Image: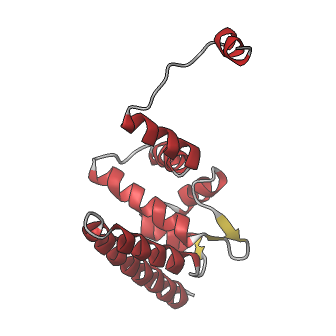
Amino acid sequence: MTQTLDREKEQVEALFQRVETVEEVAEAIEEHEPAQATRLRCVAEDALSNAQPVRLAIAAQLLALSDRTIRTWVEEGVLALVAEHPKRVDPSRLHQVLHLVRELRAAGQQRDLLSTVWYRLQDAALLDRADLAKSLQQLRRGDVAPALTKDEEQALQHQ
């Protein structure tokens, strides 16, 4: 069993390393070749989405967390469970969480990772929303208007 886990861990680590290399190249060329950078990011996302789900024990090793902590993160929705026997998590989400945990640890945070990672994932989900992206573009252009009260909105509608 240990050999199987070791082999699976090596495969996941190799996949994540390849994906991170592609992500680094995409970031390096973003300014001069945004379309190519987007294509590279799509390749990385595709590789992760087509990867086999990852055992909880391997996720724990990769994140340097206990098995119990990983189970808690699954229960809280930080890691997405995609298979039951044995329990396995989504490799795309694991990769995303791994990036966040590395950033937090590099910044000196060792405790309360669960809530911080959860909030960062929520922020990322909000930033992926099209309506928010449109609003932020309007704000950057200076295309803003003050919010109206309900009475002001009704008055405008009756004009």
Q: Residue, x 33% and y 46% (percent of image)?
A: 109
Left or right: where 3 falls relative to 64 = right
Q: Is residue 83 above or below residue 118?
A: below
Residue toward you, 4 or 143: 143
Residue toward you, 128 or 94: 128
Percent from the top left, x then y, of residue 128? 53, 52
Q: Residue, x 69% and y 9% (percent of image)?
A: 151
| Image quadrant in which the C terminus is located | top right
Q: Residue, x 51% and y 85% (percent of image)?
A: 8
Q: Residue, x 43% and y 32% (percent of image)?
A: 143
Please say whether residue 39 is visible from this viewpoint: yes
How is the rendered protein coloured?
A: secondary structure
Residue 35: quadrant of the picture: bottom left
Q: Is residue 111 above or below residue 18?
A: above
Count of residue discs = 0
Percent from the top left, x then y, of residue 86? 69, 76
Please say whether residue 65 is visible from this viewpoint: no
Percent from the top left, x then y, of residue 104? 35, 50
